[in-house]
Amino acid sequence: MRLLWIELRDFRNHRETRLDVPEGLTTAVGPNGEGKTNLLEGLFYLLTLSSPRVSGDSLLIRDGADAAYVRGESQGRAGRTLIEIEIRRVGANRVHVNRSPVHRKRDLRKLVRAVFFGPHDLRIVQGEPGARRDFLDEAIRTLWPAREPLLTAYERVLRQRNRLLKDAGGSGRPRGLETWNAELARSGAAVVESREEAAQRLAGPADAEFRRLSGHGLDVGYLPNVSGHDVEEAFLERLAQREADELLRRTTLVGPHRDDLHLGVRELTVRGFASHGEAWGAALSLRLGLSAAVAEVFGEPPVLLVDDPFSALDPKRRDQVAAGLPGRGQVIASVADEHDVPGGSAAIWDVSSGAVREREGVSDGAQ
């Protein structure tokens, strides 16, 4: 699939930006702080109804404005899809797809797909397990939008069971715990199975990307807190084993909220032993691997948004990444240095103070 055009109005520092988006590789270039990342964030928001940088939508609205507007049109297997979004400072956002209102993110994600890489992705490989769990869950939502309710169902049951344990106050086994155990095991088993499948889909492509970049393999493996031939049954057994500890600590100690994702290079964990450049390469490889997995599942490549991919790489690896960006479907990359504009760019956008100007005379490669 591909974007045909995008319009941002009062989005971050973009007062009014409208662009036609060509096929292939487009590069946004300009000094840091001028609006390149904001532009890519707007493209991602258009296709996912979420920001890769912040959880609160009000932060996306330009200072002094009451609302931000993001509009655009995509073309792909589902045909043409017109997306119109009003991000409101007060009240609920308004989203229309092909002129009809949409209230759930997954309804849009069934039609369009996007993958975003940015410097914040270092937390996946260097941060706490929660960042890797979030990445796995994002992969599930991107690969199979219809499975999003599995994740929200588990989170809801976990909150309610934790409340039950907390309210018991260490005074013994609370009434109704058996029922919540069954609900937690049932919803948790579904999350475990989906995370396992997502990790398997990612492992091969991410390893191939990292080998191309570094010459070494990237070992990607799911580390579930509960595992077994029958996950639901194993879940119930673990809950029984840890019940005394849970009643004492008044919180749930068993389940997917304690999962992790193993990332290894040369038989060592990336988090503990990789260099900064290797960690950066691993994070980038995970996103490129997700893009490849989406193309396989979805039947066409997603829109790939790559923000500042070269900053932590040496010149050799920078050239390898740049050479590998064309040929992945529609890719929009941002760079701060003119010398980092990849060859093969179908278009170059110069970004300054939230304004974007398409450079003339770019058709067969970067100037």
Image (spheres, rainbow, N blue to C red):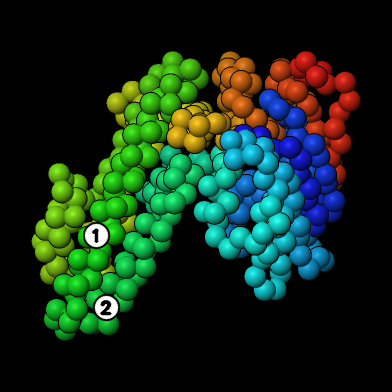
Q: Amino acid at mark 1?
A: Arg
Write the residue at 11% across / 58% down.
237
> Where does the image place residue 127, in percent across and percent down from the top left?
43, 46
In the figure, residue 338 lies in which quadrant?
Answer: top right
Residue 312 visible, this orientation: yes
> Where does the image place residue 351, in percent across and percent down from the top left?
81, 38
In the figure, residue 358 lies in which quadrant?
Answer: top right
Residue under circle 2? 164
Q: Quadrant of the N terminus?
A: top right
158 left or right of 70 in image: left
Residue under circle 1? 186
| Secondary structure of the residue carrying numbered label 1 | helix
| Secondary structure of the residue carrying numbered label 2 | helix
Q: Nearer the viewer, residue 45 or 299?
A: 299
Work out how far the residue at label 2 is from the one at label 1, CA to CA, in angstroms: 18 Å
Residue 305 visible, this orientation: no
Write the residue at 65% across / 30% down.
330
In the figure, residue 114 lies in which quadrant?
Answer: top right
Q: Nearer the viewer, residue 124 or 226?
A: 226
Write the residue at 24% across / 76% down.
165
Q: Quadrant of the C terminus?
A: top right
> Where does the image place residue 36, in percent across and percent down from the top left?
74, 41
Q: Amino acid at mark 2?
A: Leu
Write the residue at 24% across / 66% down.
183
147 left or right of 328 in image: left
Note whether 15 is above or below 177 in the view shown: above
